[in-house]
Image (tube, rainbow, N blue to C red):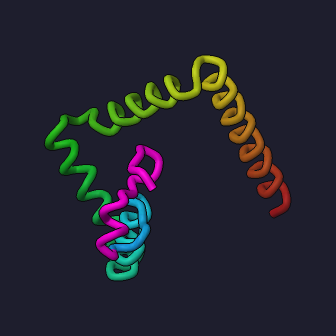
């Protein structure tokens, strides 16, 4: 299997007996293990520490900048039409959640 941007697997890592796990899968497993060690509150605290460290390094708008960069990348991936469709789907989802919340308030 050749290395590519979709799976991050390399033939050499498999040949060395390290298994057939992508970088993403390894990160997810590590994150789940750390979450079990720290518990939900400790894991949340760790995330907040990471955000604060990022803000110290990149400035107070770091999270907004990251979100904007991600949105721009996604727009490039989907094109204008696909990005517009994604926004429409998101708007419908928000509308449905609002209506569901209103219905549950009325049933109390």
In the image, what residue occupies the spot 77% across and 55% down? 105
Q: Is residue 4 magenta?
A: yes
Dominant secondary structure (helix, strand or loop) of the stretch shown in magenta: loop
- As displayed, is residue 17 above or below residue 97? below
Q: Quadrant of the C terminus?
A: bottom right
Query: Farthest residue in the bottom direction?
Result: 37
Q: Is residue 104 left or right of residue 31?
A: right
Q: Quadrant of residue 83?
A: top right
Q: Is 60 located above or below residue 6 in the figure?
A: above
Question: Going by the image, does 56 lie left or right of 46?
Answer: left
Position of 29 relative to 3 (above/below): below
Q: Which residues are magenta?
A: 1-17
> Residue 81: percent from the left, percent from the top?
66, 19
Q: Which residue, as the protein is rendered here, is positioned at the far left?
A: 57
At 38% from the left edge and 29% from the top edge, which residue is drawn?
A: 69
Looking at the rendered image, the quarter that the N terminus falls into is bottom left
Picture layout, residue 99 above or below residue 43: above
Q: Position of residue 55 (x, y in %)?
A: 21, 42
Point out residue 96 in the picture as x, y percentages from the top left corner.
77, 43
Q: Residue at x 33, y 39 (%)?
A: 63
Q: Position of residue 78 (x, y in %)?
A: 58, 27
Residue 95 lies in the magenta-colored region: no
């Amino acid at each position: 299997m050749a290395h590519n941007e979709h799976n991050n697997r390399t033939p050499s890592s498999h040949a060395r007996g390290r298994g057939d796990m992508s970088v993403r899968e390894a990160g997810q497993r590590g994150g789940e293990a750390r979450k079990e060690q720290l518990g939900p509150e400790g894991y949340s605290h760790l995330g907040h520490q990471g955000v604060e460290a990022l803000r110290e390094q990149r400035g107070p708008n770091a999270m907004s900048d990251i979100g904007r960069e991600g949105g721009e990348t996604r727009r490039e991936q989907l094109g204008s039409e696909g990005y517009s469709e994604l926004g429409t789907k998101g708007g419908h989802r928000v509308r449905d959640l609002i209506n569901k919340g209103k219905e549950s308030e009325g049933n109390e």
